[in-house]
Image (cartoon, helix red, strand yellow):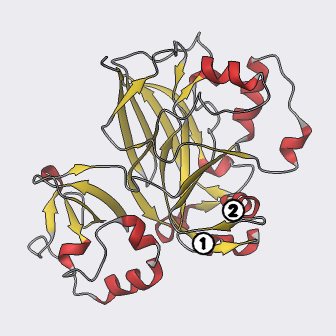
Amino acid sequence: MKFVTFEKRDGTIRAGWLLDQHHAVDMYEASGGVLPSNLLAFLENSDAFLERIASLSPYTNEHKGVYPLNELRLLAPLPIPKSFRDFYAFEQHVKTARENRGLEMISEWYEIPVFYFSNHLAIKGPGEEIIKPATCDWLDYELEIACIIGKEGKNISADGAEEYIFGYCILNDWSARDLQRKEMKVGLGPAKGKDFSTSIGPWIVTKDELEPFKLGKGFDLSMKARVNGVLLSEGNMKDLYYSFAEMIERASEGVTLYPGEMIGSGTVGTGCILELGEKVHRWLTPGDQIELEIDQLGVLQNEIIVEER
């Protein structure tokens, strides 16, 4: 299933799932209030709610609570995750980005999957405008995939971690590289270079839909990024050095994970301008259209704008 959050023409914001390529189900309305109106509440009891959906009569385009997609505005599928941890799990990206800065690979990266916390209150969805930070001259995209936690757990082993995953979505970890570079010289961060915006969407695909594509430590899913229609980045999720199960094991060590938390993969190889270099493409500027596309997960598009003062 593909879960979405959307705004109706009357301004009501609801959650549901895609019925087909042209229709979405408002799960609260369609179930007569049995299912919640937002996805975070759904995730907090997702096993029971998924069983409830399976027990309902098959939906049709004429069913109550079913709306044409062209009458809805898709929002971030999980508008306010409970938290957002972003890992650094693709080896090619780490090595190339460090080489471009004249740095050697560090052995510690191969010992543990590392992450940082980003701003879970600055989430954007498909089609939303991304405001370029006023003091940023080196604005970058990052082509990533995220998993959404669907079950509470602590000290989760990698062997059993997949049962804690609800689903996956495209993630764009926007980066102000000049701000990031300066703050990381102090030995902390990234923080201010990241906290202005993160895009996810257009929907969350439940993990069962990706099982046929399982390969290596990930899935055989092509990952692409285009700027103004020009293909710049191309990678594959199967190239993960650390699996999401290993990331969850690390994140939950001594800490409880809760439904609705989001975990990012880090950037796939070639998945940002920092890695590609300015000879391939300049830093992003207002008016640029950025599209991230991942097989089975859809296309996430955003435009860069300048903040009005």
Compared with 15, 177 (above or below) is above
Residue 162, image x and y in percent?
63, 70
Most distant residue in the right direction: 107
Compared with 225, 144 (above or below) is below
Residue 64, image x and y in percent?
11, 75
What secondary structure is found at the residue carrying circle 2?
A: helix
- Which quadrant would the N terminus be assigned to in this image? bottom left
Kindly identify which residue carries mark 2: 248
Residue 173, image x and y in percent?
53, 37
Instruction: Give amino acid for label 2.
Output: Ile
**Viewer-side residue, 155 vs 299:** 155
Q: Kindly check if marks 1 and 2 are in contact, taking CB atoms under 8 A apart as contact.
A: yes
What secondary structure is found at the residue carrying circle 1?
A: helix
Q: Which image quadrant is residue 35 in?
A: bottom left
Q: What numbered label is drawn on residue 164? A: 1
- Which quadrant would the C terminus be assigned to in this image? top left
Instruction: Give amino acid for label 1.
Output: Tyr
Most distant residue in the front direction: 309
**Viewer-side residue, 97 vs 237:** 97
> For this view, does 290 lie left or right of residue 99?
left
Q: Which image quadrant is residue 147 in?
A: bottom right
Going 15% across and 68% down the picture, which residue do you hit? 66
Residue 212, image x and y in percent?
53, 67
> For this view, does 64 lie left or right of residue 147?
left
Most distant residue in the top direction: 279
Q: How crowded is mark 2: few (under 14 residues within 10 Å), some or many (20 or more)?
A: many
Going 48% across and 32% down the picture, which residue do you hit? 196
Going 48% across and 56% down the picture, which residue do you hit? 81
State the separation of the CA atoms marked 1 and 2. Answer: 9 Å
